[in-house]
Image (cartoon, helix red, strand yellow):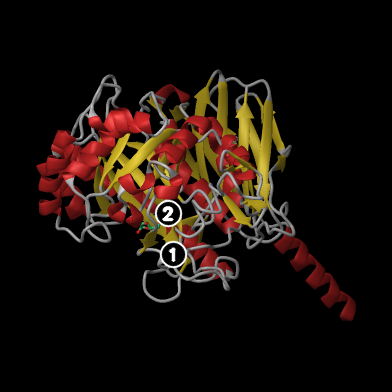
Amino acid sequence: MKKHIFLLIALVSVAIISAQEQSSISLRPDSAKQIINKNIYGHFAEHLGTCIYGGLWVGENSPIANINGYRKDVFEALKKLEIPVLRWPGGCFADEYHWMDGVGAKANRPKLVNNNWGGTVEDNSFGTHEFLNLCEMLGAEPYISGNVGSGSVEELAKWVQYMTSDSDNPMANLRRQNGREKAWKVKYLGVGNESWGCGGDMLPEYYSDLYRRYAIYCRNYDDNRLFKIASGASDFDYNWTDVLMKKIGNKMNGISVHYYTVTGWNGSKGSATQFTPDEYYWITGKCLDIEDVIKGHIAIMDKYDTKKNIALLVDEWGTWFDEEPGTVRGHLYQQNTMRDAFVAALSLNIFNKYSDRVKMANIAQIANVLQSMVLTRDDKMVLTPTYHVFEMYRVHQDALHIPLEITCATKEIRGRQVPLVSASASVKNNLTHISLANISLDSSQEITINLNAKATNITARILTSKNISDHNTFDKPETVKPADFKDFKLTGNTLKVKLPAKAIVMLEVK
Ligand code: AHR
């Protein structure tokens, strides 16, 4: 009897360990028509906690290795991501930022109190020149978020002139006096941030009028052409988008939307590293809701702008959990696990799909804040699982999007069905890339992919880990990192991939 029970337990364990689902994906290369704007792989750096000071910038006199004040380890890690666009200086911070305080001799720059984020005192040593020079070094387009909430039209208009004019005028001359002869190229200009909330607590009708005033005085100097972005809605606030589309229309080049993957805004948002399977699936479901949010805003935009001239920019997105115990309140420093890697992979797959309207997305934030790429402590730095997703997904930047259909099992969680497989495909330079994610914690997926095109050679990389809560720490920085992946077989146009549980894979098909 004992022997039988043992056998039964052994069989059940084998069944659990080797649980496997069947899924299928069909690529439609013939219907491909849309380029995935590389700016979907954009980033966001706010004066918040240690994102700027300690994260990107340590100053020229720091004992921490730096290149003219920029942290060397962080800079080198970010350079590898091929960051297309970087948004700065906020966030909520932007609507209290006065750019004149951050230019000129550092010793003369006034200190500021960061009212939004923990009351931290900052010395303004990272200002316009430091930001725009960093963008140049990274090869990223700068995206300036202007102060509408507590600033003035004149202040923002002068900032634009300071940055972008090569003529003989007071602001361009001030810039020259401050050490920069040639104007920078600044394309993306955000007219306020979250103007319905921390950016001025406005109603959409009032904001629309204000936007129009700001937009008219923020001019194009020489050959610099501004791409003006209206401060958009949060989540499902479709009325905000509707009013702005009606009242601003084509006086804006883009409108933003913010969506955070968060359990809720009141009370605890849950630990970034300690969570149950139920909480994991719930968060993936919350993440997938971003597709409904995007579809909802696009539907409104389509009503007013059938030719899709106005872009939708998801210029803040990512996970938001409780701050790490022991860190400063208001600094939004959170760890980053494989769960965050899934939120990144799923979100990017969705943005790619709507690339006919979604022209930019900026994950929040680049260092030490929310769903960051890197975490730093003193002179140490770790790459997060989210960093690895961005590194693997670089190949989708500016590639031709290939539509696809997925058939897969779902997981029921608190009454909702979460599809277990997510995917996206694109082609560039005769290389097709397919990003796959198996959300399941316990079942592998045998995915049959109909490429609907000839293939000769395939290589792949995988991001996975033993536990979904695994993350990289300063003591163990390489717990989660990509590896080569070979569990696939090509027969004719059909590719069979065995995707382990909780794994993200990037396939390269030649
Ligand atoms: O990214 C953190 C904050 O979230 C930003 O400052 C704000 O725009 C949003 O509410």
Looking at the image, can residue 84 be seen? no
Quadrant of the rendering where the N terminus is positioned: bottom right
Q: Mark 2 points at which residue?
A: 47
Beta carbon at label 1 within 8 Å of ligand 1? no
Q: Which element is circle 2 on?
A: loop
> Residue 481: x, y in percent?
69, 47
Which residue corresponds to the image point at 53% horizontal and 38% vertical from the top-left? 25
> Residue 85: x, y in percent?
43, 36
What number of labels is visible?
A: 2
Beta carbon at label 2 within 8 Å of ligand 1? no
Amino acid type of the residue that numbered disc 2 sits on in the rendered structure: His
Per the rendering, the mark at residue 271 is none
Amino acid type of the residue that numbered disc 1 sits on in the rendered structure: Thr
Tag in front: 2 or 1: 1
Q: Which one is in front, 432 or 129?
A: 129
Q: Does residue 220 lie above or below 191 as drawn?
A: above
Whether pointer 2 and pointer 1 mark residues with C-beta atoms closer than 8 Å, the reply is: no
Q: Which element is circle 1 on?
A: strand
Quadrant of the rendering where the C terminus is positioned: top right
Q: Mark 1 points at which residue?
A: 120
Looking at the image, can residue 436 be seen? yes
Q: Does residue 454 lie above or below 108 as drawn?
A: above
Q: Quadrant of residue 377?
A: bottom right
Q: Does residue 417 lie above or below 415 as drawn?
A: above
Q: Which one is in front, 322 or 433?
A: 322
Instruction: Describe residue 508's horizontal placement relative to residue 315 as left or right.
Output: right
Q: Quadrant of ligand 1?
A: bottom left
Instruction: Describe residue 99's horizontal placement relative to residue 388 as left or right.
Output: left
Q: How crowded is mark 2: few (under 14 residues within 10 Å), some or many (20 or more)?
A: many
